[in-house]
Image: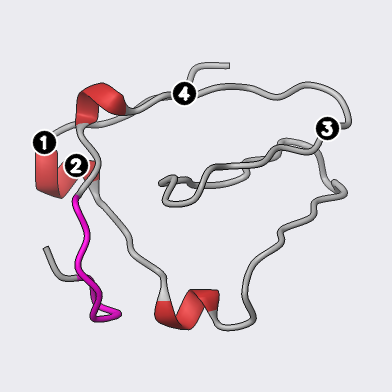
Amino acid sequence: MKSSCGHFYIPPAVEDVRIFRISGPKFLKLNRGTWHAGPLFKADTMDFYNLELSNTNVVDHTTHNFRTQNGVDILIDD
């Protein structure tokens, strides 16, 4: 598939999706090419560090909609 940014990508497979919770003050490193969303916070404020290129959201912003493209809703119960 071709993203709106112009690069080609392979959409994530539904069966490969993993959702996890991180507790406490931690740093998390994602491997290159990891599809990710969030972080999702419940607190009113949170210290959050995101290391990325200055133009990441311009040249490398690809969205996959599981509902429209796979017919799947993903619910996260608390």
Instruction: Name the front one of labels 1 and 3.
Output: 3
Residue drawn at x 46%, y 23% is 76
How crowded is the residue under tag 1: few (<14 C-alpha within 10 Å), some, or many (20+)?
few
- Classify the position of the N terminus by image quarter: bottom left
Q: Looking at the image, tell me whether mark 4 or mark 2 is earlier in sequence order.
A: 2
Q: Choose between 72 and 31: the one closer to the eye.
A: 31
Mark drawn on residue 67: 2
Q: Looking at the image, tell me whether mark 4 or mark 3 is earlier in sequence order.
A: 3
Q: Is residue 73 above or below residue 8?
A: above
Mark 1 lies on residue: 71
User: What range is drawn magenta here?
Assistant: 3-10
Q: Determine whether the residue tagged by mark 2 lies in a helix, strand or loop.
A: helix
* Residue type, numbered disc 4: Ile
Residue 18 lies in the magenta stretch: no
Q: Looking at the image, tell me whether mark 1 or mark 3 is earlier in sequence order.
A: 3
Q: Residue 57, how many percent across, how many down? A: 50, 75
Between the residue at mark 2 and the residue at mark 1, the CA separation in whole angstroms equals: 4 Å
Is the C-beta separation of discs 2 and 1 under 8 Å?
yes
Mark 3 lies on residue: 26
For the stretch drawn in magenta, the main secondary structure is: loop
How crowded is the residue under tag 3: few (<14 C-alpha within 10 Å), some, or many (20+)?
few
Q: Looking at the image, tell me whether mark 2 or mark 3 is earlier in sequence order.
A: 3
Between the residue at mark 2 and the residue at mark 3, the CA separation in whole angstroms equals: 31 Å
* Residue type, numbered disc 1: Gly
Instruction: Specify the quadrant of the image occupied by residue 39.
Output: top right
Between the residue at mark 1 and the residue at mark 3, the CA separation in whole angstroms equals: 34 Å
Q: Determine whether the residue tagged by mark 3 lies in a helix, strand or loop.
A: loop
Mark 4 lies on residue: 76
Instruction: Specify the quadrant of the image occupied by residue 13.
Output: top left
